[in-house]
Amino acid sequence: MSIYLPIAEMNVNILLIIFIGMLVGGLSGLFGVGGGFLMTPLLIFLGIPPAVAVGTEAPHVLASSISGAIAHWRRRNVDIKMGFILLIGGIAGSTVGVNIFKILIGFGQIDLIIQLLFIFFLGLIGFSMLFESARTTIKKYRTTSTIRTKLHQHSWLHGLPFKMRFHRSKLYISTIPPILIGFVVGVLSAMMGVGGGFIMIPAMVYILGMSTNVVVGTSLFQIIFVTANSTFFQSYLNQTVDIVLASLMILGGVIGAQIGARLGTKFRAEYLRGALAFIVLMVCLKIFLDLTLTPSELFSLSNQ
C-alpha cells in the first residue's frame, strides 16, 4: 500500500513509514533524543532527497518530543527553568541554522554537507558514549566497596557570571554555558533535521553536571520549541516540509514515544548509553559507506 509524496515527488509504502516512525519515536522516549539522528538517514536510505528528509523530520521530532516530554513531566523529571535557559540559545541557533541551510541549497551542496555532518557528529558522540558506558560498567563491577563522592565537582564553569540556581537539577551555575549549548544544538537541529538530544544530553551531563534523572525530560522539553521553530522556517523559507510524509511519521512516532518512555525506567543508565552508542555508530557507518563506496550503477536517471 503506497502513497505519493508531493514535495519529495515519489511513492512510499505507508506501513513502512509508520513502522519507522514508531521505532524512532520509541528511541525518543527511551533515550531522550528527538530521533532525527536515526530517522533522517533512514529517509535518505529510502530515497527521500536529503533536503526534504531534513525539513520533514522536524515536525516528526516535534510530535515525538511532545509525547515523550508529557510522559516525563508526569514523573516530575523535567527542569523547566533549565529548559527555558537552553531555549534562549536554541531558538536563536535554529533560526541561524535554517538560513545557513537555505544558502547551502543555493550553492547545490546541501546533500553532501548533511552527510558529512552526520558522519562527524554521529561518530564523535557514538564513540564517546560507548567509551563512557564501558568505563562506568567496568568500574561498577570492579568496585567492591561503596565510596561516597561529591555530588558536583567544581570547574571553570562555576567562575562565570550570571549565575542562577536550578533546584530541580540541584545546580548553581552561570547561564552562559546552557545558552551556548542551546545555540549550537539549535544550529545543528535545523541543518541536520535532528532534535539535538544526542548532543544535548551528553553536554547536560558532562559539561553542566545535571542530575541524570532530569536530563531526558529536560532535553525533550527544549527540543519541542526548537524543532517547532525549525519546522516553521523550513516550511516558510525552504519549502522542504512534506506534510504527507510528516503525518505518517508523526502517527507512528507519538505511539512509539509513549512505549519508549515506559521502557526507559526498566534499564540501567549505562546500558541505555551503550545501546544508543551502538545504534549511532551503525547509522554513522552506513552513511560513510554510502558516501565512499562505488555504487553498483555509476549513472542513473531520477525524477527527483
Image (cartoon, helix red, strand yellow):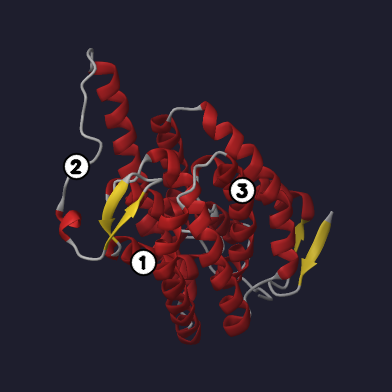
Give residue 194's position: percent from left, percent from top.
50, 60
Looking at marks 2 and 3 on the same chain, the residue that comes earlier in the sequence is marked by 3
Residue placed under numbered mark 3 in the picture: 70
Task: Describe the element under mark 3 as helix, strand or loop.
Answer: helix
* Residue in the picture at 34% in, 38% down: 130
Give residue 120's position: percent from left, percent from top.
35, 58
Q: Amino acid at mark 2?
A: Gln
Q: Residue furthest right?
A: 1
Residue placed under numbered mark 2 in the picture: 153
In the visual, does 218 lie left or right of 136? right
Find the distance from the CA under tag 1 to the CA under tag 2. 24 Å
Q: Residues within 10 Å of mark 3 (few under 14, many from 20)?
A: many
Residue placed under numbered mark 1 in the picture: 184
Asked whether residue 299 appears in the rendered view, the answer is no
Q: Amino acid at mark 3?
A: Ile
Asked whether residue 190 appears in the rendered view, the answer is yes
* Residue in the picture at 30% in, 48% down: 171
Q: Residue furthest top?
A: 144
Give residue 52's position: percent from left, percent from top.
61, 71
